[in-house]
Image (cartoon, grey):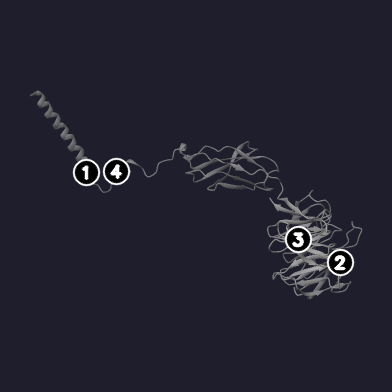
Amino acid sequence: MCIFGSMKSYLSVLTAMLLIFCFSRCEKTEDPNVDPVEEVVPDTLPTPITDLDRPIGLTVSKGKYGNRIIISWTAIPLAKNYKLFKFDGVKDEYVLLKETADTTFTDLASTFPLEKVFYKVMVYNSATAYSRFSDVDYGYTTGKTYSKAFHFGSEGTGPGQFEFGMHVETDGAGNIYVCDDVGNRVQKFDANGNFKEIFFTGSGARAVAFLNDGSSIVTRTQSSSYVLKRDAQKNVIKEWGTYGTGVGQFRNIEEITLDDDENIYIVDGQNNAVKKYDKNGNYILQFTAAVKTDEQIDGPYPYGICYLNDKIFVTSPRNSQVRVYDKSGNFLKFWNAGSVVNAIKAKNNKLYLCCSGFVMKTDENGEVREEIGRGEFTGQIPGLAVNNNEDVIVSDIYARRILVFKQL
C-alpha cells in the first residue's frame, strides 16, 4: 500500500510539471511578436580575431621600376579590407600607408634609389575583426625610368645594316625608319628592330615624316629636288626644292616636323632657316632659326625641330640653346639645355633631346629633366624618335646601330 501510494504521488507531481511546461510553451508560441530564434541567436556576432588568416604572399618590387615600388599579396578568405604599413626610419616604426580593399598598391612616395623600403600588411575588417601581420618584405627603386631594351644594326650595306644612319622616325604602327645619309636609303623595321623593307632609295636620304592619310614626306641632300611627297603606296605625288639660298631652296636639310594642321617645317642648316610648307608642298614662309653664342666658334646652324603646344622648338649642335618660335616664325624665347643638342622630338606633352651622351626628357620649358641612356652610347647620337608607347629610339651613328629604351 505504501509503495502504491508513493507511486501515485510521484505520477501526480510529474503530470503537474508536464502541464505547466506545455502551458508555458503554448503561451509563448501564441505571441506573434516573439521569434524564439531571435531570442536565442542575435543577428550579428563579433568575428573572433582568430578566424581571420593573416595575409600571405607579400611581394614587393625590387629595382624593377625607376620611380615606384609595387606591393601585392594574396587575397585572404573573409577579408573585406586590408591595412598596409611602411617602415618609417625617422620614427623608427611602421606607419599606416594605405587602407584598401585591393590586394595591390603602388607606392609613389619619394625614396632614394637602391634604398630598401620595408612593408607588411594585415586584414582589417573592423576594430574587432582583424588578423596578425604578414611576413615583412622590402623593395626599392632604381632611380631610372628608362632602360635599354635592345639594339639592332651593324656596319654594312645589307638589309638591317648602316653606313651612316642619322635621323630616325616612327609611324603610327610603331615601325621604325632609319635614314642612312651615306647609304642613300631609308630602311623600315618593325617595333622589335626586325628588317621589313627598303622604304626609300635616293641620294643623301635625310629625314622622313608621316601625314595622317598615310602619305609621307622624304627629304634628301643631293638631288635636283630635295623634298618628295609620296602617297601610301610610295608613289611620288609632288616634289620641290633645289640647291641654293633663295626661297624654296636648300643647302643642307636636317630634321623635319609637322604641326597640328599638317604644315611641314624643314630645317635648312647651311642657310640657317626653317622653311614652312602646307601639306601639299605649297610654300608659306621661312624664318631664321639659330644664333651664334659668345661661346661657339662656328657660325649659327639649326639642326633639330619639333612641334608642341602651338610652338616650334629648334636646336643646334653648336650651342646649348633650345629656341622657341610661334607657328608664324616669331621668336618667343630660349632656354639652356646645358649641352649641345642634336635631334629633338615631342610626345605626350614632353620634349626629348639628343644631348652629349644621353637623351634628355623634359617639359616644354626645360625645367623638369630626366636623363635616358647615359653611358650606353659610343659616340655622337644625332637622331631619335619616340613612339606611342614613349619608347625612345636613338641612332648611335658611329657604332652603326639603333638603341631602343623602354620605360621601367
| Residue occupied by mark 4 | 36
Which label sits in the foreground, 3 or 4?
Answer: 3
Closer to the chain start, of discs 1 and 2, is: 1
| Residue occupied by mark 2 | 252
* Residue 345: image tag: 3
Q: Amino acid at mark 3?
A: Lys
Q: For numbered disc 3, what is the local secondary structure? A: strand
Residue closer to the observer: 161 or 65: 161
Extreme-front residue of the structure: 158
Quick one: label 3, few (<14), some, or many (20+) residues within 10 Å? Answer: many
Residue 223, above or below 357: below
Q: Quadrant of residue 136?
A: top right
Residue closer to the observer: 380 or 98: 380
Closer to the chain start, of discs 2 and 3, is: 2
Q: Position of residue 81 (x, y in %)?
A: 51, 45
Q: Amino acid at mark 2?
A: Asn
Closer to the chain start, of discs 3 and 4, is: 4
Q: Position of residue 15 (x, y in %)?
A: 15, 34
| Residue occupied by mark 1 | 27
How far is disc 4 from disc 1 in space, using C-alphas? 12 Å
Image quarter in which the N terminus is found: top left
Q: Position of residue 261 (x, y in %)?
A: 72, 71
Q: Position of residue 356 (x, y in %)?
A: 82, 53
